[in-house]
Amino acid sequence: MNKKAAIFDLDGTLLNTIADIANAVNSALWENGLPYRSVDEVMHFVGNGAHKLIERCVEDDPSKADDVLADFERIYGTDCVNQTRPYSGIGALLRRLKEEGMLLGVLSNKPDFAAKKVCEHYFGGIFDFVDGERDGVKVKPDPSLLLAELQKRGIKPPDAVLIGDGETDVKCAEAAGVDFVGVDWGYRSESVLREAGAKDVACCAQELYAIITALGSEEE
């Protein structure tokens, strides 16, 4: 094992969360007298945090953004594990990496309370840290939080890999100086990831494991 830490995006990488997110979004929109958004629209809007998600959903009536955001966070806080499910093979992948001594973390633009809740619900205590969007902390693609978590544990950026399904993950990894591996089962296509700069894109959990464990071997 050449890498010491594997840091994962959450939505679209570890968990298929889009149904619960879309339901909470549309409940919040309905409570504020605004039209529904399709699941495809919500999928296109996610990736830059809840604030940006709601801004995109209410672009025709931005004055209601704060109210819709508050309602979304209230609803999603209760209903974030109804239809959400781990992607195939993810649980086994995480256990295998953990057993082989790798530090595991989650770096998400999902609200911090929800990121912690779904990770605990679906994965127990397997992660060494779970960070989501919260006040006063910049979200991806800003690398500050990722670098802080690595520094806290004495891990240098070249010894870590970030795994994700979106352009923000690619850019975050590049800014932090860590390797990146994309996954093609999430909310962005392989072509989008490669256009953003991803060199490695996995099509399944087994291939993801093979790519992660091979990273850095050519440097030895």
Image: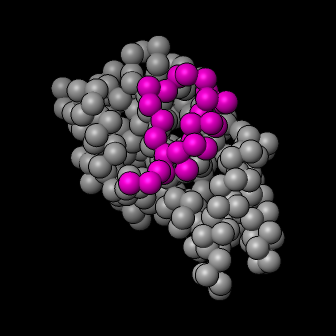
Q: Which residue lies furthest to the bottom in this view?
A: 60
Residue 116 in view: yes
Tell me which residue sits at (49%, 56%) in the image: 166
Tell me which residue sits at (38%, 52%) in the image: 137
* Residue 41 picture quarter: bottom right
Is 67 drawn above or below residue 197 in the view shown?
below
In magenta segment, residue 112: yes
Q: Is residue 72 left or right of residue 217?
A: right
Tell me which residue sits at (44%, 54%) in the image: 135
Q: Quadrant of the C terminus?
A: top left
Q: What's the coloring here?
A: one colour
Q: In this view, does 161 lie to the left or right of 193?
A: left
Is 76 drawn above or below residue 122 in the view shown?
below
Tell me which residue sits at (42%, 15%) in the image: 100
x%, y% of residue 151? 24, 34
Residue 201 in view: no
Q: Nearer the viewer, residue 197 or 75?
A: 75
* Residue 42 picture quarter: bottom right
Q: How many marks?
A: 0
x%, y% of residue 175? 27, 54
x%, y% of residue 116? 56, 37
Residue segment shown in magenta: 111-136
x%, y% of residue 1? 33, 21
Q: Is residue 6 left or right of residue 25?
A: left
Q: Which of 178 and 128 is in front in this view?
A: 128
Q: Is residue 27 left or right of residue 43?
A: right
Is 95 drawn above or below residue 170 in the view shown?
above
In magenta segment, residue 48: no
